[in-house]
Image (cartoon, rainbow, N blue to C red):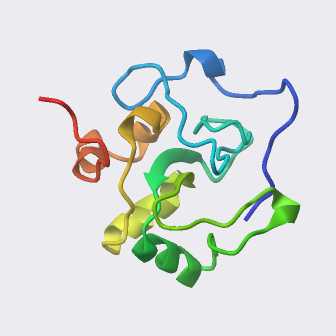
Amino acid sequence: MTPPLAMAGVSDAPTPPEDERNVHGDPLEPCSTDPMTGALRDGECHALLRDPGRHEVCAVMTEAFLEYSRAQGNDLMTPRPDLQFPGLEPGDRWCVCVPRWLEAAEADRAPPVVLAATNESVLDMVPRSQLEAHAHDPPDD
């Protein structure tokens, strides 16, 4: 786990944070403030140039995903105060890395996705249909 990138007043998002969009093309909604998530620890899944892990998918943690992630070497359950990381439990929302989410999907362990809080930048790696198939918040038809 890398330390959070939070720096007062600093953002290197390709798009100003207030203009970022979700996978529906609407304004990006917060993912979680309890626990506080995002590379900037501001609750949002920003697309940042300095975040090579691409913490852009807002996901609802499941036991299966948390165990899968730990087995891959990324323990998301153990608190790490030195990294401003509280440790996660099933039901928590968290900005997860695009590549890890894809790996988990291939292993049938992907957590549900909060589409309104998932950055549209993920669409360069994940088809919208795949995200919608894992939607925590199914679209209104």
User: Looking at the rendering, in which quadrant would you find the N terminus?
Assistant: bottom right
Quick check: 81 left or right of 90?
Answer: right
Quarter occupied by residue 5: top right
Compared to residue 15, the image places residue 99 above or below, namely below
Compared to residue 21, the image places residue 115 above or below, namely below
User: Looking at the rendering, in which quadrant would you find the C terminus?
Assistant: top left
- Give the total number of marks visible in the rendering: 0
Place of residue 54 in the rendered image (x, y in percent of width and height, measured from the top left)? 60, 47
Residue drawn where x is 53% and y is 40% of the image? 31
Quarter occupied by residue 70: bottom right
Place of residue 73 in the rendered image (x, y in percent of width and height, measured from the top left)? 63, 79
Quick check: 54 left or right of 136?
Answer: right
Compared to residue 24, the image places residue 83 above or below, namely below
Quarter occupied by residue 127: top left
Residue drawn where x is 35% and y is 55% of the image? 112
Residue drawn where x is 55% and y is 52% of the image? 94
Between residue 56 and residue 115, name the one nearer to us. 115
Quick check: 35 left or right of 97?
Answer: right
Place of residue 63 in the rendered image (x, y in percent of width and height, measured from the top left)? 44, 74
Compared to residue 91, the image places residue 27 above or below, namely above
Residue drawn where x is 50% and y is 52% of the image? 98
Between residue 84 and residue 15, name the one nearer to us. 84
Query: Residue lying furthest left in this view?
Result: 141
